Image (cartoon, rainbow, N blue to C red):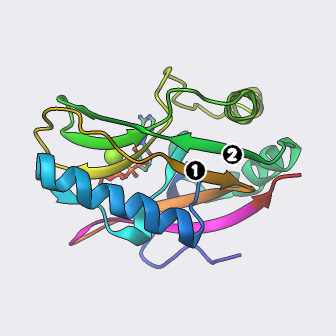
């Protein structure tokens, strides 16, 4: 377990996410370069690529134990996520690669996490969303180029903390949970 890093006072900006293995990270980064050629903007650093499952935002550190207990109760099964759909959002100028056909296991994992967090009193942002990995910031988007599907074997989920650095957000993985 990585200790939450310096300069946090008594709260952390937290989210649950899928964190890519090296092969998946390389494939996602390649698609990031491809989309950047089409759309411009600023590429995400390879080491920061992830897919957010549930966003908690600023959370008092005293609640960390309760939070970890929630995640312990989620028992998802291993599955594969296929990301093949490029997209962008005008309102926040983000370019991404997403999944159009989410497996039932993905939906189960996201729902189970959100349910256990909600029942413990955490306010999660549960807006319906496209499961996606942000690849570009500050992009205008454009025509949707064909993207080679990224096949991502999902065998864990993580709790991560984000902090703002001079070169954008940095994320620290706080804890990992293996899928069965
Ligand atoms: P920055 O906000 O500095 O531009 P960021 O959005 O990557 O960078 P955070 O805002 O801390 O950093 O978000 C961490 C993760 O949670 C990101 O994947 C982000 O897309 C996601 N996220 C942030 N806010 C929400 C929200 N309200 N609902 C769902 N997901 C969110
Ligand atoms: Mg943000």
Q: Residue at x 45, y 68 (%)?
A: 26
The magenta segment is 167-176
Q: Residues within 10 Å of mark 1 (few under 14, many from 20)?
A: some
Q: What percent of the width, then of the height, locates residue 110? A: 67, 33
In 3D space, how far apart are the residues under numbered discs 2 and 1 (Cα atoms)?
A: 7 Å
In the image, is residue 72 part of the stretch drawn in magenta? no
- Give the class, few, some or many, for how many residues have Cα within 10 Å of label 2's Cα (few <14, many ≥20): some
Residue at the image point whose x is 18% and y is 55% from the top: 36
Q: Residue at x 50, y 27 (%)?
A: 100
Whether the magenta-drawn stretch holds residue 172 is answered as: yes
Q: Which part of the image, by quadrant, shows the N terminus?
A: bottom right
Q: Nearer the viewer, residue 9 or 46?
A: 46
Q: Which numbered marker is on residue 80?
A: 2
In the image, taking residue 43 as reference, residue 60 lies left or right, namely right
User: Residue drawn 56% across and 61% down?
Assistant: 20
Q: Quadrant of residue 142?
A: top left
Q: Which mark is residue 159?
A: none
Q: Using residue 110 as the reference point, say whether residue 138 is left or right of it.
A: left
Asked if the residues shown at circle 2 and circle 1 are in contact, with their CB atoms under 8 angstroms apart, the answer is yes
Q: Indicate left or right for 110 with 25 as reference.
A: right
* Residue 151 numbered mark, or none: 1
Which x, y percent locates residue 62? 68, 56
């Amino acid at each position: 377990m990585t200790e939450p890093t310096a300069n946090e006072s008594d709260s952390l900006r937290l989210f649950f996410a899928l964190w890519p293995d090296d092969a998946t990270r390389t494939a996602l980064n390649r698609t990031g370069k491809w989309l950047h050629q089409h759309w411009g903007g600023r590429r995400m650093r390879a080491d920061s690529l992830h897919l957010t499952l549930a966003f908690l935002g600023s959370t008092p550190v005293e609640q960390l134990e309760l939070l970890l207990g929630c995640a312990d109760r989620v028992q998802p099964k291993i599955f594969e996520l296929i990301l093949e759909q490029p997209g962008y959002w005008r309102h926040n100028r983000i370019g991404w690669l997403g999944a159009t056909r989410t497996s039932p296991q993905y939906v189960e994992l996201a729902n189970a996490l959100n349910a256990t967090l909600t029942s413990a009193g955490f306010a999660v942002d549960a807006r319906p969303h496209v499961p996606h990995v942000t690849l570009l910031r500050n992009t205008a988007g454009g025509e949707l180029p064909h993207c080679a599907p990224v096949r991502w074997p999902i065998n864990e989920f993580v709790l991560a903390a984000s902090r703002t650095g001079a070169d954008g957000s940095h994320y620290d993985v706080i804890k990992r949970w293996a899928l069965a």
